[in-house]
Amino acid sequence: MTRPMLFLSALTAFSPLSFAAKPLARAVDPCALVSGQPFVLPADALACWKSFPFNETLRQNVLINNIARVFDFYTFEDYYLDSPPPFQESTANIRAGLARINTTKYETDYDFNIDLYNFITQLNDGHTRWFPNCYGTYQNLLPAPVVSLEIDGLQGVYIIPDLVALVTLLGPLYTSLITIDWQRLAGARVISIEGQDPYSYIDFIAKTVSGNYLDHGVRVNSVFSSYRLSGAAYSQRFGDLAGPTGVAQTSLTFQVIVANSTTIETVTVPYVANYLGATFTDGPSYWANNCVATADTNGVDLKASAGLTSVTPKRRQPKGNIIDKSNSSAVGLPPQFEPTLPTVGGAEGVMKSYILPGNQTGVMFIGSFEGDFNGFQNDTESAIAAFKAADVTRLIIDLSNNGGGFVCLGQFLHQYLGSTKIGYPGFQSTNRANPLARKIVASDIALGVNAELSFYTADNFAFLNGTQMPADYDYMTPDVPIIVNGQVDLNSQRFHDTCEPTFVVPIPDTPPFPLANIAIVGNANCASTCAMFSTLMNEKEHSKMAVFGGKPLEAVQFKGMAGNQVLEWVDIDSEIKTANLQDDPLAPVDLLVNGDFRHNWRTAWSFLDENEPIAYVSELPQFRFPYTLDTYNNPQNLWLFVEKQLFA
Ligand SMILES: *[C@@H]1O[C@H](CO)[C@@H](O)[C@H](O)[C@H]1NC(C)=O
Ligand SMILES: *[C@@H]1O[C@H](CO)[C@@H](O)[C@H](O)[C@H]1NC(C)=O
Ligand SMILES: *[C@@H]1O[C@H](CO)[C@@H](O)[C@H](O)[C@H]1NC(C)=O
Ligand SMILES: *[C@@H]1O[C@H](CO)[C@@H](O)[C@H](O)[C@H]1NC(C)=O
Ligand SMILES: *[C@@H]1O[C@H](CO)[C@@H](O)[C@H](O)[C@H]1NC(C)=O
Ligand SMILES: *[C@@H]1O[C@H](CO)[C@@H](O)[C@H](O)[C@H]1NC(C)=O
Ligand SMILES: *[C@@H]1O[C@H](CO)[C@@H](O)[C@H](O)[C@H]1NC(C)=O
């Protein structure tokens, strides 16, 4: 949420008298105790979550009959056996992990799901996540988000100086549950967290909580609080220390030196959990409203649903994006830190553009590649027209916390900045040719299905010479075996994307700015389509790449998850059902619970080394800067700093 949600029902839902009137026939239902309350203590939220006993039928449904089979489509499965440096932390034997979870004894359904959630999260691929809705309804919030700042030439960890302005935005229902004088922690220097050096503890959170990004250094930046655009609004993430998913942690103990003091003191700061799920009154209604599969959980045969409407189905756009559950643990950036310069060009969508004083440098802050597909292209065209009209010659693109989005919008922006001169604006791609995938492609051909209903059919793609493949072309026959960590991995033939026909604004014949005058900046939390775009700008156009933040002396890649196209469970299930293969023994079965196992379905191959997925190529930025008091939550100050540093 960008602004705190208020649940007025919270004021009336719970009256002790109504319980006292009931016979003491059963133990108190822990979910009834927290129902109707937007903010509760994490231990109380956890008691509700842990009130549902472990159920073997659900384990077999989720783990063995669904997730284990979806993993057959996961492009990076074999890479995980031994992730190359510097990504070695993201190493796991996926099949051994699933087998362990299949035989572990669990007390509660929560214990099973959280073990599975943590195992898949720690693959550190935001495209490949298990989100059980039942246990994603609460989020912990600590009134002490942290940042790494350089002050007087020294880097250290601090509680955010804008603490009071930010936390106040959560509203009095939140702050009334915080039992300490949290306001005085604003700007405090952190000496230790849970008895450890603060950067070591942040490394620990990056390793065990954050997920999403293969590179450890990128995850370190997810732990800190940071600014971003959420949709069209400025917001400030709490970061994964202060806003983790889940409610396992009840407090954190810090040693701090508060502002204007020289004394080290110890404070224990409590988390408060925020409820974001569907309304409920007790355990059974919590389960019914949040945990049971809904009409949208599983896929459908799109041939049938297409027939139900008179509207011609339109080809769907492939996506590469992140589901950032911490989205909801961000509130608005306190307004005094938003840019004061006027926006130029279209600025209602996911992109906001500005001209810095002096008219030499334009800024595009691109929060994601989601939203209005054509509107994004229009906004790009009008921002660049405004820059040209003001004689701007240099461009800063801020990709801080860009969560990705439409694959073709990343390629569009690359093409627009590079002009028609660069030719194909993408990279080579493949998907996995496992036996079921091969059956899907063959069945789609036999059924006459095309890209209007399927992401699998060949007309989604082009041959490497740019000619679009015909829908009935079987690009998985013959398959292409590659050896990954000693395993034979069967791939499709290589192909290109077919984005160019979706470009609705004219592509310039020459680059609008010299490509060396483009600086790409951010906190490296740049997911998927954002990673593809920044990699193309680095590998092909040699733009200046700058990363802010991170741990001093620890490397940070400039891009995060560089998979390619993600399929949600509902998407791959629809592919299978549309190909009439739902009864195939290899097909994953419908989930009985409300959840989503998404996976990275396509690999993007690096332009620098076409035998390596972009995801596994180490690409460090040429420029690294610490955040300062002026820049950590103030995008305009950061852009002015970049202008001075990179274009002097
Ligand atoms: C984040 O939340 C906002 C407001 O609820 C929403 O508009 C936006 O699409 C969300 N962004 C992502 C990346 O989930
Ligand atoms: C386990 O879950 C299944 C599927 O939802 C349900 O039919 C069954 O009753 C549950 N078992 C128990 C013991 O609750
Ligand atoms: C998982 O456990 C079930 C029940 O114990 C067993 O039948 C099945 O073979 C196991 N599957 C895997 C993949 O380990
Ligand atoms: C610390 O001192 C400065 C300068 O006197 C003052 O502006 C600031 O408000 C003080 N901060 C706190 C938290 O007391
Ligand atoms: C894009 O711009 C064109 C021409 O100005 C306009 O007709 C169209 O409605 C715009 N589309 C969107 C989605 O903003
Ligand atoms: C910058 O461009 C704007 C709009 O074109 C113009 O009004 C302004 O005078 C220019 N400022 C400078 C310092 O050149
Ligand atoms: C591109 O390659 C395909 C497959 O090899 C071939 O059928 C097609 O004719 C080629 N197109 C052009 C324009 O060369």
Image: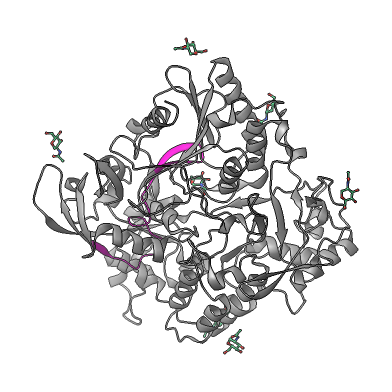
Q: Residue 325, position in %: x, y? A: 47, 56
Q: Is residue 40 visible?
A: no
- Total tally of numbered discs in the picture: 0
Looking at the image, residue 523 sits to the left or right of residue 364; the answer is: left
| Residue closer to the observer: 523 or 108 | 523
Q: Is residue 237 magenta?
A: yes
The colour mode here is one colour
Residue at image coords 25%, 48% = 158
Q: Residue at x 46, y 61 (%)?
A: 211
- Residue 585 percent location from the top left of the image: 75, 80
Closer to the camera, 531 or 599?
531
**Residue visible at 53% across and 61% down?**
125
- Residue 504 in the image: state x and y as whole percent: 73, 32
Residue bounds of the magenta highlight: 227-252
| 551 relative to 595 in the view: left or right | left
Foreground of the two, 375 or 623: 623
Q: Is residue 114 left or right of residue 243?
A: right
Queried whether the magenta region covers residue 184, the answer comes back as: no
Residue 512, placed above or below residue 35: above
Up/down of 634 relative to 93, above or below: above
